[in-house]
Image (spheres, rainbow, N blue to C red):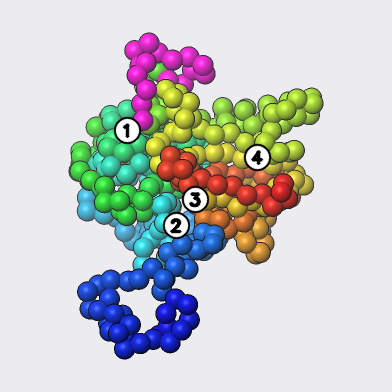
């Protein structure tokens, strides 16, 4: 063992190190590179999950594992290979494929963790949030903010799968988790086309006077695909007409927002949707914080670090903190993204670096 300046140890110094160990202490100078690296050094690694494989496994789970009290949900978490034994996609984000068979009901419960659902295909399931049945359809983003009771019921004979995103890893690290069982089924088994939350809140630019107080999470339980699609389509149309509307040439994008604040839909999770014209490549960028992406439609590639991977509809990939990423589209390329950006920004850790812009 040596001192910080590289000189040889003395017997007194060797005894000091033994005393460190005996008293559960660790000197900074022996671990500075681990505790304070020059740039983020995440344990999570870039990884891609194939939708066809995920769906096949979820379908087999549906045949073999009943849904109900105890496990509560037939949801299979995507485990980052760099975080073995956790079931976590990133150190802050949990992502799972959830599968509900024909005419099945997932009982109600609530938890302090924030959650959402995004549907890449299918329909026929309603998620009931605090007694309000919300239809789930292709391309929809459905919210279940923390401590809202929620359950799901499938009104059809056909199974349906979607992805769940939650802040479970962050909540676990911070020791803020609570959980409570609710109704054995769901409190309202109706199947309306439009939820009560949408009837009140889903009117662009209009806010009910009955709800003027700001809310930490969005009171709008569903963000419908037809509006997302229209917003992206108009951004590209405006670009064609010579007006500034896209984030980059050929790259349209939207952020789902809380109508009471204009901020993120939930306090710990940011949700976005991106559309690239065919043949577009985005510049590589590094970002503090982590994100999970799902291909909604189209084909293209993602470069994560120095590895390029082909993607098709439904595939998911994870971008750990500060790992450079870029996209290339072979066709029109639509992607849903969620991240821990609200946490990073609120704690003033957020940072982005685009090498080609420097």
Q: Secondary structure at mark 2?
A: loop
Q: Is residue 280 left or right of residue 272?
A: right
| Precedes in sequence: disc 1 or disc 4 | 1
Vertical placement of residue 182 versus 212, above or below: below
- In space, the residues marked 4 and 2 are separated at their CA atoms by 23 Å
Residue displayed at 43% across by 87% down: 8
Residue matched to label 2: 89
| Precedes in sequence: disc 3 or disc 1 | 1
Residue displayed at 35% across by 71% down: 27
Residue displayed at 31% across by 38% down: 146
* Percent of width and height locating residue 186: 26, 36
- In space, the residues marked 1 and 2 are separated at their CA atoms by 25 Å
* Percent of width and height locating residue 262: 48, 26
Vertical placement of residue 139 versus 284, above or below: above
- In space, the residues marked 2 and 3 are separated at their CA atoms by 12 Å
Label 2 crowd bin: few (<14), some (14–19), many (20+), radius 10 Å = many
Is 205 included in the stretch rendered in magenta? yes
Q: Nearer the viewer, mark 1 or mark 2?
A: 2
Is 300 included in the stretch rendered in magenta? no
The mark found on residue 275 in the picture is 4
Q: Nearer the viewer, mark 3 or mark 1?
A: 3
Q: Secondary structure at mark 1?
A: strand
């Amino acid at each position: 063992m040596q001192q910080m300046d590289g000189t040889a140890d003395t017997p007194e110094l060797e005894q000091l190190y033994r005393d460190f160990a005996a008293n559960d202490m660790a000197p900074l100078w022996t671990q500075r590179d681990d505790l304070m690296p020059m740039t983020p050094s995440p344990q999570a690694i870039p990884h891609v999950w194939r939708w066809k494989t995920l769906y096949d496994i979820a379908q087999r789970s549906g045949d073999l594992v009943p849904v109900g009290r105890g496990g509560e949900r037939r949801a299979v978490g995507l485990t980052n290979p760099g975080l073995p034994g956790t079931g976590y996609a990133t150190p802050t984000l949990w992502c799972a494929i959830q599968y509900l068979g024909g005419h099945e009901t997932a009982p109600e419960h609530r938890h302090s963790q924030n959650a959402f659902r995004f549907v890449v295909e299918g329909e026929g399931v309603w998620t009931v949030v605090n007694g309000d049945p919300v239809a789930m359809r292709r391309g929809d983003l459905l919210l279940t903010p923390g401590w809202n009771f929620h359950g799901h019921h499938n009104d059809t004979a056909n199974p349906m799968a979607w992805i769940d995103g939650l802040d479970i890893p962050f909540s676990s690290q911070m020791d803020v988790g609570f959980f409570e069982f609710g109704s054995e089924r769901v409190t309202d088994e109706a199947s309306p086309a439009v939820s009560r939350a949408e009837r009140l809140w889903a009117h662009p630019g209009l806010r009910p006077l009955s709800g003027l107080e700001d809310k930490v999470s969005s009171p709008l339980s569903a963000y419908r695909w037809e509006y997302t699609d229209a917003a992206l389509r108009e951004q590209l149309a405006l670009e064609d007409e010579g007006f500034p509307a896209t984030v980059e040439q050929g790259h349209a994008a939207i952020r789902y927002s809380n109508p009471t604040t204009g901020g993120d839909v939930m306090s710990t999770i940011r949700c976005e949707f991106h559309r690239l014209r065919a043949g577009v490549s985005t510049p590589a960028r590094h970002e503090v914080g982590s994100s999970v992406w799902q291909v909604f439609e189209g084909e293209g590639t993602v470069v994560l670090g120095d590895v390029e991977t082909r993607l098709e509809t439904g595939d998911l990939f994870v971008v750990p903190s500060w790992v450079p990423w870029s996209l290339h589209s072979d066709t029109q390329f639509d992607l849903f993204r969620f991240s821990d950006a609200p946490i990073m920004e609120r704690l003033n850790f957020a940072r982005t670096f685009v090498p080609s812009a420097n």
